[in-house]
């Protein structure tokens, strides 16, 4: 009996050691990737954690240099935790990073980035990550790499758990035949499954979206989206259904992400920018929906107005060729 009791007393430490082994295994591929990246690229591009230094909108103004052109690019619509595995259960407070690296500069182009003191709470009902990028177009010159390191916050740092640790490639060469349509990739891990929704665009340019309140109340909440006419999937620019829309000191609405890519300049494609807004304190059913449509251009800006009744918002889309 004493031996059995001793075994029961060691049960929790045994589980902790198993967790540590599991996490070490999960992180091993990520560690290998970062070591390899450092050996190959650090002399040219610096530290493995460095953010991409290439900005968007490089060719927004005329005259546009002759080397700038339309180029294949990846539009990332969303990333969602579709299921939890093992001992994890909803809700979870998530922090960490998801970044993509292309051959433009090989540095991280973050699409999700949160510190431990700024977690995002995910629930079974709402498990989509609030994306903050990419900050510029992800160009498909060569296969690209996704780098994922997400953690679940515990009561103290020593109790944090790895949610997902992965590196995977998107081979734009072999996948070119599926370009122009909505695609889905499921990253299966030991503790969760991540769903990436994206589109591979043949010939794309950048569009940077900005909105500011020109008239009326700034005390409202809402969801701002962008999509193209050819792919019926939204990019969420900002969603503040539970709080007031944030506005910068110069009057612009602060979007979570503002850069999207749009296919072609043949006159057939359109960029649609929309908002669903309601005054603070009003019932959700009283929200006002408004959309405006923009025709892509090789450079410059396009303007329109989002009029939701209690305020008018000016929307401007800046255009740029990419490479």
Image: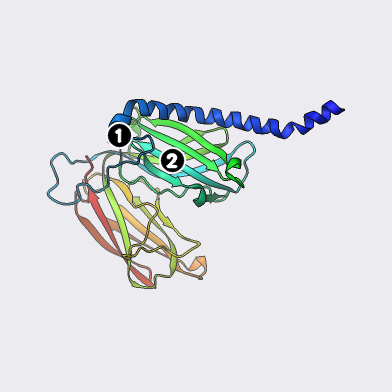
Foreground disc of the pair 2, 1:
1
Which residue: 42% across, 35% down?
A: 147
User: Is residue 114 visible to us here?
Assistant: yes
Give the structural element (helix, strand or loop) at label 2: strand
Is 12 left, or right, of 172 in this rendering? right
Q: Which mark is residue 136?
A: none
Foreground pick, 98 / 221: 98
Q: Residue furthest right?
A: 1
Give the spatial CA distance, label 2 vs label 1.
Answer: 19 Å
Quick one: label 2 or label 1, which is nearer the N terminus? 1
Is 300 left, or right, of 228 in this rendering? left
Which residue: 36% across, 71% down?
A: 311
User: How many numbered circles does the render carry?
Assistant: 2
Is 123 rendered above or below residue 280?
above
The spot of residue 178 in percent (x, y) is 35, 34
Foreground pick, 282 / 190: 190
Question: Which image quadrant for residue 245?
Answer: bottom left
Is 142 rendered above or below residue 163?
above
The spot of residue 14 in percent (x, y) is 69, 30
Residue bearing the label numbered 1: 45
Is 257 rendered above or below residue 30?
below
Residue bearing the label numbered 2: 98
Is 51 left, or right, of 13 in this rendering? left
The spot of residue 135 in percent (x, y) is 33, 46
Q: Quadrant of the C terminus?
A: top left
Is 72 rendered above or below residue 261?
above
């Amino acid at each position: 009996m004493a031996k059995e009791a001793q075994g029961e007393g060691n049960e929790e430490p045994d589980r902790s050691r198993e967790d540590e082994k599991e996490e070490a295994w999960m992180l091993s591929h990520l560690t290998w990737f970062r070591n390899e990246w450092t050996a190959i690229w650090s002399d040219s591009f610096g530290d493995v954690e460095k953010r991409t230094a290439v900005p968007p909108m490089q060719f927004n103004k005329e005259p546009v240099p002759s080397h700038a052109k339309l180029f294949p690019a990846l539009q990332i619509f969303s990333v969602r935790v579709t299921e939890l595995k093992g001992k994890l259960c909803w809700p979870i407070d998530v922090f960490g990073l998801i970044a993509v690296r292309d051959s433009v500069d090989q540095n991280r182009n973050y699409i999700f980035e949160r510190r431990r003191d700024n977690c995002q709470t995910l629930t079974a009902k709402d498990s989509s990550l609030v994306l903050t990028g990419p900050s510029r177009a992800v160009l498909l010159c060569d296969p690209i790499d996704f780098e994922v390191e997400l953690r679940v916050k515990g009561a103290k740092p020593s109790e944090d758990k790895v949610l997902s640790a992965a590196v995977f490639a998107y081979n734009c060469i072999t996948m070119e035949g599926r370009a122009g349509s909505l695609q889905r990739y499921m990253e299966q891990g030991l503790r969760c499954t991540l769903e990436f929704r994206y589109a591979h665009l043949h010939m794309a340019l950048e569009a940077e979206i900005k909105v500011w309140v020109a008239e009326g109340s700034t005390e409202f909440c809402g969801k701002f989206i962008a999509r193209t006419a050819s792919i019926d999937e939204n990019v969420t620019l900002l969603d503040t259904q539970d709080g007031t829309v944030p506005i910068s000191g110069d009057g612009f609405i602060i979007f979570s992400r503002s850069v999207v890519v749009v296919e072609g300049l043949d006159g057939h494609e359109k960029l649609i920018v929309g908002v669903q807004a309601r005054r603070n304190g009003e019932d959700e059913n009283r929200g006002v929906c408004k959309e405006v449509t923009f025709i892509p251009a090789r450079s410059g800006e396009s303007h329109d107005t989002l009029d939701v009744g209690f305020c008018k918002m000016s929307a401007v889309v800046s255009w740029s060729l990419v490479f």
